[in-house]
Image (cartoon, helix red, strand yellow):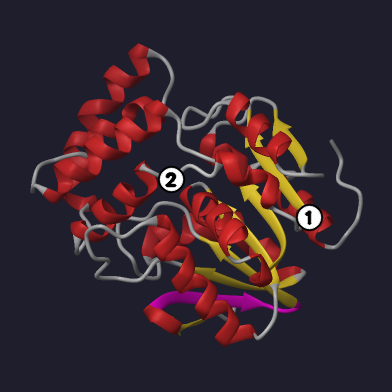
Amino acid sequence: MDIVEGTLEHDLPYYAFGAGEALVVLRWFTPDHANPTGLERRSELKALEDLGRSFRVYAVNRAPHMPAGTTMADIANDHADAIRKQFGEAVFVLGMSSGGSLALQLAVDHPDVVRKLVIAGSAYTLSEKTRAVQRDYTEAVAAGKRGAHLQAPVTVDSKLEQALLVPVLWLTDPFLRPEDPQDMLHFAQAEDSFDVGDRLGDISMPTLVIGGDRDLAYSTELFRATAEGIPGAELIIYPKAGHIGTFTNKRYVDDVTTFLQGKTVQK
């Protein structure tokens, strides 16, 4: 695959591949505000590469050196500027997990840059469990402590699985450390207060919400409430799919492509 890397306006890192109409993918929560490498890139491309058959995919991350006090609206402002300068027109936008929070903020604040919207594994606000886990994890790492094990409650469901996973994550934590933990801390703080529930009715572009019924980070009720709040939005819930399982589901790429191309999505 021919991958091009660079930065957009406001120093937003991106990598691009594929051919067709532009599809801006707002990436999930990342430890570093940079383009992915190694295992992280392979994992992400597994969810995205087939989209390159139909679209020119631009996978965009948040800018490095994010200052304290940054809000989701601030981040959306930067992305809107970057889209206007790079493309000069509205584009397809796919927000994955935390990228979905940003995509929704972008849609309510800057509808002129979003042609069609897909929200995958995300909702109009964080669940209380995810908010607490994300806060504890990022604060621990920013303080120089081990924190990977704190993500177990949104990784596996049963208490036994969590008990087995915690020591593994604790041991691997030093290998997962970000170069600048302040970036993910400040983004997590921005997402902590993110809630556009009372503005969903302002979203005017065609929208698709996708979630898994076994997602531990977001509930089916949150997915449903997000879709029901957006006029005319479509909703797909994958059975037996967890958070990451949503993006690796065998239907995922076809559902995103079908919707963006204006065809009828299978429910």
Write the residue at 44% across / 19% down.
157
In the rendered view of the protein, which quadrant contains the C terminus?
top right
The crowd level at tag 1 (other Cα within 10 Å; few <14, some 14-19, many 20+) is some
Real-space Cα separation, disc 1 to disc 2, in angstroms = 22 Å
Write the residue at 61% across / 31% down.
241
The crowd level at tag 2 (other Cα within 10 Å; few <14, some 14-19, many 20+) is some
Determine whether the residue tagged by mark 1 lies in a helix, strand or loop.
loop
* Res. 8 in view: no
Determine whether the residue tagged by mark 2 lies in a helix, strand or loop.
loop
Is 17 covered by the magenta stretch? yes
Q: Which residue is mark 2?
A: 194
Q: Which residue is mark 1?
A: 206
Q: Position of residue 163 (x, y in %)?
A: 27, 18
Kind of residue at badge 2: Phe
Which of the pair 197/128 is nearer the observer?
197
The answer to whether 84 appears left or right of 194 in the picture is right
Q: On screen, 247 above or below 15?
A: above
The residue furthest right is 264
